[in-house]
Image (spheres, rainbow, N blue to C red):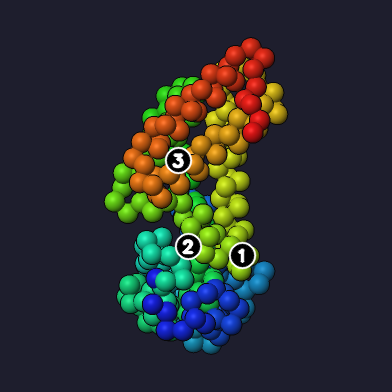
């Protein structure tokens, strides 16, 4: 994956008043995961008796598949517009046009703009982390090459023409103070990144103490965020390379007998 003009202010921020009278649209939660059966269909215990004249099962499956395809189109359009221009700059009518669906259908899938924003962030988190992990698994080689491979992946991402920095820092800067959904998605993304880096550190040769391992993972996460911000704001093409070099210093210090990364 290396990887908005509203008609009114009411249409632009994801508030409770932006709802339409339809079912709440749930979102995928892990990199690229699709909604579960629990999200989309009644469970066996909660299923209602089939009504007289109900559509055949095959037609129902086709309808569900079509609904999933529409949802994906909406999320694809939202990701391009929200990430490229900002959440508040894009209205629901523009999103509907970009997705090629009616406004009614858009609100059937996502009853409020805040629902769509949250779904966009959760799906992007899942895809972003999956793409990173796939690259590191393929290019990292042994355990000692996996952390540096994180920064090699960043360098390739930074070179993409649609790179606009961290979607989660961007969205938090726009709406973090007023939207709990946005703030939560941003925090969980950053926590998941630290957890992933902690796993890479745990695989390094030798037995690092838990405290040292957690400290090193946190410092590596700061290097990742700093490189992303430098590349986005300052257009620093070499930000990933510089962060990689700093990560190598931290790793070397961690390998040294009795050495700990200096706390900031």
Disc 1 to disc 2, C-alpha distance: 18 Å
* Position above or below: 221 against 170: above
Secondary structure beneath dot 3 equals helix
Secondary structure beneath dot 2 equals helix
Mark 1 or 2: in front is 1
Can residue 3 be seen by looking at this rendering? no
Relative to residue 136, is residue 43 drawn left or right?
Answer: right
Spot occupied by residue 2 in the image (x, y as percentages of width and height): 37, 47
- The reply to whether dot 2 and dot 3 touch (C-beta < 8 Å) is no
Q: Quadrant of residue 250?
A: top right
For disc 1, the marked residue is: 177
Q: Residue furthest bottom?
A: 52
Local crowd size for mark 1, using a 10 Å CA cut-off: few (<14), some (14–19), many (≥20): few
Local crowd size for mark 3, using a 10 Å CA cut-off: few (<14), some (14–19), many (≥20): many
Can residue 24 be seen by looking at this rendering? yes
Spot occupied by residue 47 in the image (x, y as percentages of width and height): 62, 74
Spot occupied by residue 118 in the image (x, y as percentages of width and height): 53, 64
| Residue under the image location 46 percent in, 51 percent down | 166
State which tag comes first along the sequence, 2 or 3.
Answer: 2
For disc 3, the marked residue is: 227
Q: Quadrant of residue 256?
A: top right
Q: Quadrant of the C terminus?
A: top right
| Residue under the image location 62 percent in, 58 percent down | 184
Residue in the foreground of this view, choosing between 201 and 24 = 201
* Tally of numbered tags: 3
For disc 2, the marked residue is: 120
């Amino acid at each position: 994956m290396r990887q908005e003009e509203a008609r009114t202010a009411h249409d632009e921020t994801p508030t409770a008043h932006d709802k339409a009278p339809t079912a709440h649209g749930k979102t995928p939660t892990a990199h690229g995961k699709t909604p579960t059966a629990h999200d989309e269909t009644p469970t066996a215990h909660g299923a209602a008796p089939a009504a007289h004249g109900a559509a055949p099962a095959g037609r129902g499956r086709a309808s569900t598949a079509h609904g999933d395809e529409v949802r994906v189109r909406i999320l694809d359009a939202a990701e391009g517009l929200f990430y490229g221009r900002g959440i508040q700059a894009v209205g629901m009518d523009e999103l509907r046009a970009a997705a090629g669906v009616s406004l009614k259908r858009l609100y059937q899938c996502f009853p409020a703009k805040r629902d769509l924003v949250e779904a966009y962030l959760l799906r992007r988190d899942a895809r972003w982390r999956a793409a990173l992990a796939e690259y590191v698994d393929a290019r990292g080689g042994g355990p000692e090459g996996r952390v540096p491979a994180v920064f090699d992946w960043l360098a390739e991402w930074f070179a993409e023409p649609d790179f606009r920095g961290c979607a989660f820092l961007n969205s938090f800067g726009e709406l973090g103070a007023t939207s709990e959904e946005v703030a939560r998605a941003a925090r969980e993304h950053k926590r998941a990144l630290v957890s992933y880096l902690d796993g890479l550190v745990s695989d390094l040769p030798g037995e690092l103490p838990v405290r040292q391992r957690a400290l090193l993972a946190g410092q590596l996460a700061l290097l990742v965020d700093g490189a992303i911000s430098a590349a986005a704001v300052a257009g620093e093409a070499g930000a990933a390379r510089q962060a990689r070099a700093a990560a190598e210093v931290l790793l070397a210090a961690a390998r040294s007998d009795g050495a700990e990364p200096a706390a900031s």
